[in-house]
Amino acid sequence: MQALFFYIFAFLSIAGGILMVSFKNPLSGAFSLVLSLVSLAGLFAMLEAEFVFILQVLVYAGAIMVLVIFTIMLLNLQKEELQEAPVGKLRVLLILVVCAVAAFGVAQVFSMLPTGMATVDPNFGSIEAVGREMFSSYLYPFEVISLVLLVAVVGVVMLAKKVV
């Protein structure tokens, strides 16, 4: 049953990514990216990485995508710019052939892999384990990123005040 859910989430993730780059309409592409991000969150949930699952849903599929969709809507694109190009039969056939070849290649690679399950630490992906690693092993990079984000926020505020 777990393998079935894995294949469903993996298929949805890949399909969302392919749809995202194939749509001409940026709003359709953004919603396809939401599909891909939510299915990735499902894969993290299957790995029992609760913290990464929650971050994926809240930060990426939630906040970042809302920001992207608002930006697209603020662009106020005209109807002519949002029209989808007609998909020809040759293009569909080419996409199907490429997908079939890629699926065959992936099947060949997976058939060569060992069939055993990897051992995972029981605390893998938990909030406690992530916090312990972040504030012990990765404290310096965490603080550097915090300073970079602070400088970026101050820069945005300064640029916004010049405009107003």
Image (cartoon, grey):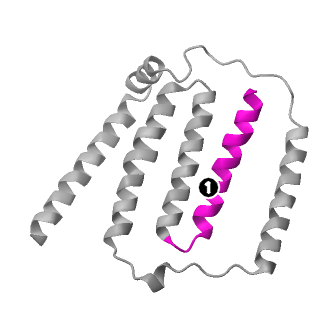
52 shown above or below 61: above
User: In the orientation shown, which residue stands out farthest toward the top?
Assistant: 122
Q: Which quadrant is the C terminus positioned in? A: bottom left
x, y percentage for residue 126?
Answer: 49, 20
Residue at image point 78% right, 69% down: 95
Is residue 125 rendered to the left or right of residue 58?
Answer: right
Q: Which residue is mark 1?
A: 16
Q: Above or below — where is 70 with respect to 65?
A: below
* Residue 101: percent from left, percent from top: 87, 60
Q: Which residue is drawn at the image coordinates 39% and 36% (left, top)? A: 141
Q: Dividing the picture into quarters, in which one does residue 58 lie?
A: top left
The answer to if 93 sits in the magenta stretch is no
Circle 1: element type:
helix
Depth order, front residue of 134/37 = 37
Please give left or right for residue 37 compared with residue 76 in the image. right
Mark 1 surroundings within 10 Å by alpha-carbon count, few (fewer than 14), some (14 through 19), many (20 or more): many
- What is the quadrant of residue 94 in the picture? bottom right
Task: Count how many numbered circles sit on residues in the image.
Answer: 1
Q: Position of residue 49 (x, y in %)?
A: 55, 26
Q: In this rendering, would 27 be left or right of 85?
A: left
The span shown in magenta is: 1-25
Q: Residue at x 80, y 61 (%)?
A: 99
Question: Is residue 5 a member of the stretch shown in magenta?
Answer: yes
What amino acid does circle 1 point to?
Gly
Image quarter hosting the N terminus: top right
Main SS of residues in magenta:
helix
Q: Position of residue 16 (x, y in %)?
A: 61, 55
Residue for point 66% across, 19% down: 120
- When asked about the image quadrant of residue 76, the answer is bottom left
The one of 95 and 126 positioned closer to us in this rendering? 95
